[in-house]
Image: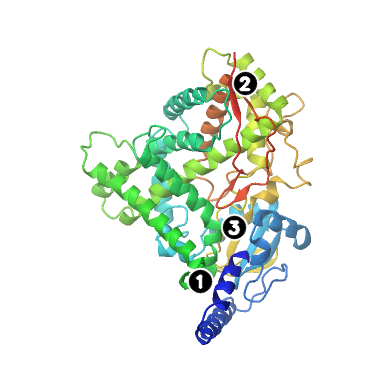
Amino acid sequence: MAVLLPIAQALLTGHNITAVLIAVVAFLTSLTLVSRFRRERSGGRILPPGPPGWPVLGNLASLAQNAHLQLTAWRGTYGDVFSVKMGLQDAVVVSGKDAIREALVRKAEHFSSRPDLFLIRLNKQNSGLVMSPYGDQWKVLRRFSMSTLRSFGMGTGILEEKIDMECRHFCTELETKSGQPFDLMHLLHNAVSNIICSMTLGKRFEYGDPMFLRLMEMSERGVELFLTAHVFNIYPVLRFLPIVGRQFKEWMDLSEESLKCFKDFIAQHEDSDRQGKARDIIEAFTTKLEDDPGSLPGDSLPHLLGDLFVAGMETTANTLRWGLLYLVTHPDVQTKVQAELDEVVGRDRPPAVSGKPNLPYTEATIMEMQRIRTVVPLSVPHCTSSDTTLLGYDIPAGTDVLINLWSLHMDPSRWDSPDKFDPGRFLDDSGQLQTHDSFMPFSTGRRVCLGEQLAKMELFLFLTNMLQQFTFTLPEGARPNFDGILGVTLRPHPYELIAVRRE
């Protein structure tokens, strides 16, 4: 793995060679013992076949960049269920519609947990919702979060009003940049984040608010750093080494500062007067604990807020960023969406969710945006909670499982020309919207995205408001990059566009 090169260089230029050799021997010995323990724990079961790997490193070198592409390529050789070595840790990769549904739906009881990752355990992120192991605590938090978000209007007109208001603020800000090349990322992240902040923290933030900008900066950096920081989950001892250890420190510092921000929000609520119905997740959580002590894990609230904030910002904002990148490079699609909006909605009133059935091409465009660049291409890692089987293979308890949603959305046997941006694939012969059984942008099963209804509403209202009021183009000579940067999510490379007010 590329990240190990600086380690080797640092060791070789050190002066105490004896100490270095002792450290290396101890390191390799510990890895051998851990590997033997894991083999014994699996009871000798043979995992699905997979690509050969290097000693100690396993397949990490091949997965250092664009892991979703490499895993999808290996699917062609090893099938829908195969194994990879993440260092000395085995992981099973599940691809394709049938295998994914088999694991996450029909065998959900076995495949719904999360891996016990060193970094997650160290900063207690497994106390929240996203990385909590499958069990009673997760079920309690999931039920609480879902019912509370619904009580705040998720999926209803109450929430639509909040999103409409944010769309107005956002489009007003866009107008100040009309005709100028600019990077939409921070503005869009700010706007989308305000929706989940209104539900979790009870407030929205003005664009440019220093504290909010810092919170977004930490979240964005954490998402970027996650993949490279994952090496510490595999080899925790590396955190003690120079150079590489700096990444570990940065990760921990970001986690601590972010957690402190959410604890401060909670403390601010404790100092304020509470009146009537809970206004946000913080008040709903504390009220439930006061009414029924022990009904919720008390230390989970700041981690839950962090989970909801990052999930509520990253997926929707990056889907819109990818979508706009495809629309500026496919102006014919942008023009068709605008023509449909003009005909059905007009220019004098804002788009409404109730109008979706009359906007099939617009809906198909949003679905194609989600398909062609799956923003969480490997989903969130799963883990088996008990011994099980999948497509005839034995999968021991405690096995990490990667759900390859990218393989699902880019499968040439399920989609014609999957690399082509074509909203028409989601329309039938009469131009009406049609579903596709290999379309799962929010995953499926018991760990399906909690905010699916919220995200669908946001994607529709933000995109339609933008295209109703503006036409987007690329600056002269711009060369868009569609490769993406893989962290927790797949983000587009930074790019500029031009928003021109429609007359």
Marks 1,2: beta carbons within 8 A: no
Considering only order in the chain, which callout, 2 or 1, is on the residue closer to the N terminus? 1
Q: Is residue 34 left or right of residue 278?
A: right
Q: Position of residue 116 (x, y in %)?
A: 49, 65
Q: Is residue 202 left or right of residue 457?
A: left
Q: Nearer the viewer, residue 63 or 23?
A: 23
Tell me the kind of residue under disc 3.
Lys
**Residue wearing tag 3:** 107
Name above or below for residue 112 compared with residue 473: below
Q: Position of residue 239 (x, y in %)?
A: 47, 69
Tell me the kind of residue under disc 1.
Leu
**Residue wearing tag 1:** 238
Residue under the point 30% across and 37% down: 278
Considering only order in the chain, which callout, 3 or 2, is on the residue closer to the N terminus? 3
Q: Position of residue 303 (x, y in %)?
A: 38, 52
Residue under the point 55% across and 23% down: 178
